[in-house]
Amino acid sequence: ETGVTQTPRHLVMGMTNKKSLKCEQHLGHNAMYWYKQSAKKPLELMFVYNFKEQTENNSVPSRFSPECPNSSHLFLHLHTLQPEDSALYLCASRQLASAGEQFFGPGTRLTVL
Amino acid sequence: SQQGEEDPQALSIQEGENATMNCSYKTSINNLQWYRQNSGRGLVHLILIRSNEREKHSGRLRVTLDTSKKSSSLLITASRAADTASYFCATEYAYSGAGSYQLTFGKGTKLSVIP
């Protein structure tokens, strides 16, 4: 596997379910990001991890819980979501010492019923 | 907010024509980046221009940056049907003084290239 991978690619869940999204980067980067992309809205930054430490939480509701066990893996744990949380969730990584390019995964299309 | 705003929201051109997309932002930046997204997929980085640069080229792409006007443009020359996608500008700034960087994205321009 190369680049940034995300699983699952599609997820349908009820409002009372608990699920997790997984992201893995094979690029040796030291920063990872979660973004939310909803229809007709700009890409929203949710969480930032630098060297496995969370450095930013952009006022994300607590029903979204990130986890970064090491510099290659990033999880987003989902619990009691709302229908308005349906969106494309994108993971990205970058090397902090480099110019600034972020590498994105293909995303997880989440539908909350 | 640093948020970039792309213009136009949608653009439809014939194959072989040039496509120009514009981006405006609000405050100081380290750099400005352009990304491309095919429908429902992840974003792909196209080009980065630093705040002290005015123009940059990469293949059929030309990016300009005017920091006095807080604006950038992306030109795709000799467009192809495969260029059909959404294009986003993203501005980067450093925050927290701890080597942390954020990208702030605009809503994007949806480009359709008709064969």
Image (tube, rainbow, N blue to C red):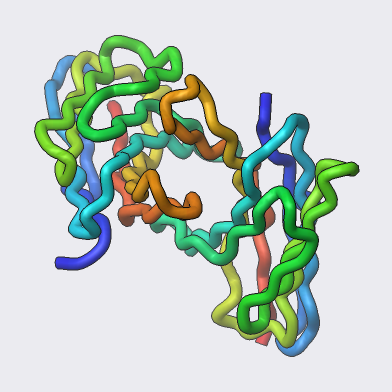
> For this rendering, which residue is in front, A102 or A43?
A102
| Percent x, y of residue A27 | 24, 59
Quick one: quadrant of the C terminus of chain A? top left
Asked whether residue A34 is in view, the answer is yes
Residue at image coords 84%, 51%: B66
Image check: B46 left or right of B23?
left
| Vertical relation: B100 (above or below) B13 | above
| Vertical relation: B49 (above or below) A10 | below
| Vertical relation: A62 (above or below) A92 | above
Asked whether residue A5 is in view, the answer is no
> For this rendering, which residue is in front, A74 or B16?
A74
| Percent x, y of residue B45 | 49, 61
| Percent x, y of residue B72 | 78, 53
Q: Quadrant of residue A58?
A: top left
Residue at image coords 77%, 31%: B26
Image check: A25 left or right of A83?
left
Quick one: quadrant of the N terminus of chain A? bottom left
Residue at image coords 74%, 89%: B16
| Vertical relation: A32 (above or below) B13 | above
| Percent x, y of residue B83 | 59, 76
